[in-house]
Amino acid sequence: MSGLLVGPPPDGVLTAPVSDHPLAKTQRLRVVEFHSRAKVFDRTYYPKFDFESALYGRGTGANTDGSFAGGTSGLDLQRSNWAVGLTATFSVLDIFSIRAKKDIELADERAEAARYDQTIQDLTGQLRKVQASLEGARHVADATPVELNAARDTETQARA
């Protein structure tokens, strides 16, 4: 019974900020994800460069004067060639679809930011509700010893 007469825990039990709640962190990361996805489209319209190379070798056994060496002379590589190139790809008409996709991602980012704000508001409301319940429980706990003494005094007077 003496355990019930112990005072409530000290103030400041709920000191962590609402933004540290796992749900708030998850929503914040969703906003960052959509921001990153929209940022990708800023670099999508740049031209793309490809480096290309080729090596070529042949061995036919045929000579330039029209004679044929015969046997296995065509198996070795007597003639060779090589090529090197750089290809630039730039799609002119993709700018419209890229802008539309970026606008969609930006709209999704704003929607996720609104969900994040809503989550913070919900968690703040839940925290305020819990704090109010805790404060009410503290008042009841503070008043319990006084009520117990009054009840004991009333019982003593009633017996007398």
Image (spheres, rainbow, N blue to C red):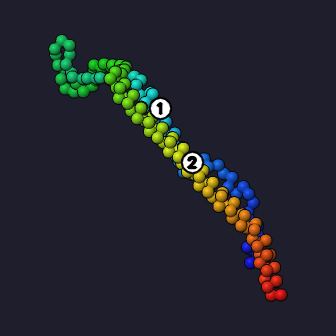
The reply to whether residue 51 is visible in this rendering is: no
Disc ID at residue 39: 1
Amino acid type at circle 1 is Lys
Depth order, front residue of 58/90 = 90
Residue located farthest toward the right when viewing the structure as drawn = 160
Depth order, front residue of 36/112 = 112
Depth order, front residue of 51/124 = 124
Q: Going by the image, does 65 lie left or right of 76?
A: left
Residue at the spot 59% in from the left edge and 55% down from the top edge: 126
Disc ID at residue 143: none
Residue at the spot 65% in from the left edge and 61% down from the top edge: 133
* Place of residue 158 in the rendered image (x, y in percent of width and height, measured from the top left): 79, 85
* Secondary element type, mark 1: helix
* Place of residue 16 in the rendered image (x, y in percent of width and height, measured from the top left): 66, 51
Relative to 81, residue 19 above or below: below
Question: Is tag 1's residue or tag 2's residue first in the polypeptide sequence?
Answer: 1
**CA gap, disc 1 and disc 2:** 28 Å
Disc ID at residue 121: 2
